[in-house]
Image: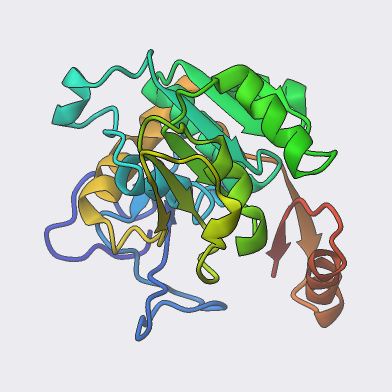
Amino acid sequence: MTKLGEGVSGVVVGDRVVTQPGFAPGSLQNGLQEFAIADVGAFAKIPSGTSDDEAATLPTNIIAPLVALFSVLKIPAPWSAAAKGFDYAGTTLLVVGGGSNCGRFGVQLAKLAGIGRIVVVGGNEAELKELGATHVLDRHGGHDSVLARIRGVVGDDLVYAYDAVSPVVDQVLALNALSSSKRGTLARLLPLGPVDESKVVGKTAGFEVRDTFGSSQANPELAGGFWERLPGFLQEGKIKPIAFVVKQGLTAENVNEVLDAYRDGKAVKKTHIHI
């Protein structure tokens, strides 16, 4: 932090901070800036026990599931007034894509809220259970096999699903896992078009597919409450940074190595390039 704007409190010049930039069309916050503006309600002071690289694993990876769970799915944020009347312990959440960064943070946020049953498809079982998952299911074997595994855990009670990774054609998995007798909702991070509803069967109570725009600036009340509490969450271990690798030097080779791995469908850890 090199300068404070008018009315900014809680930080002083010299503090380390982490922020999510705005990325809606017209935003003046871009990449490769020597200095950048951190918006109030979209940044937090980094506590002493957290490194800069650990803090940098958070945005945008945690804001997307934050918005998906506590705005799109309308589960009350645990610090909100509505939390007092919500049965978190009796709630089940399905997370598809547990091996992704947004999946890992989705599990942590569900655990933070006290959701009683957190059922995850994909990812490392030991890691995800340490983060708060109650069930981790194999994602292999095809739609019918994975759906059977999910249904074996949730029965016909599931009304909240969060898909962190799937293209439209595969989002029917989470939709078919939703309850047939209760209206359920899927929050998705990749809104690439309409779902083929002919492949979603037995939903007598109906269902909803909702898109997630994981922006702090677009969700100021929710995100502001989260960023305000984040230093405490990190210090208390309620939110844990995800794994990352560091590459030294902003070179085309370093950047293309990461992009090529994504293109080729390889497993990619969050990569930080130190200039």
Could you say where residue 239 lies in the image, as x and y percent from the top left?
50, 31
Residue at (83%, 39%) from the top-left corner? 140
Q: Is residue 49 left or right of residue 47?
A: right
Could you say where residue 233 lies in the image, as x and y percent from the top left?
41, 28
Could you say where residue 57 lies in the image, as x and y percent from the top left?
59, 49
Residue at (33%, 56%) from the top-left corner? 42
Nearest to the observer: residue 117 or residue 172: 172
Nearest to the observer: residue 235 or residue 109: 109
How many tags in the picture?
A: 0
Q: Quadrant of the C terminus?
A: bottom right
Q: Which residue is most to the bottom? A: 26
Residue 237 sits above or below residue 197 on the image? above
Q: Is residue 246 visible?
A: yes
Nearest to the observer: residue 73 or residue 128: 73
Q: Is residue 16 visible?
A: no
Residue at (37%, 76%) from the top-left corner? 24
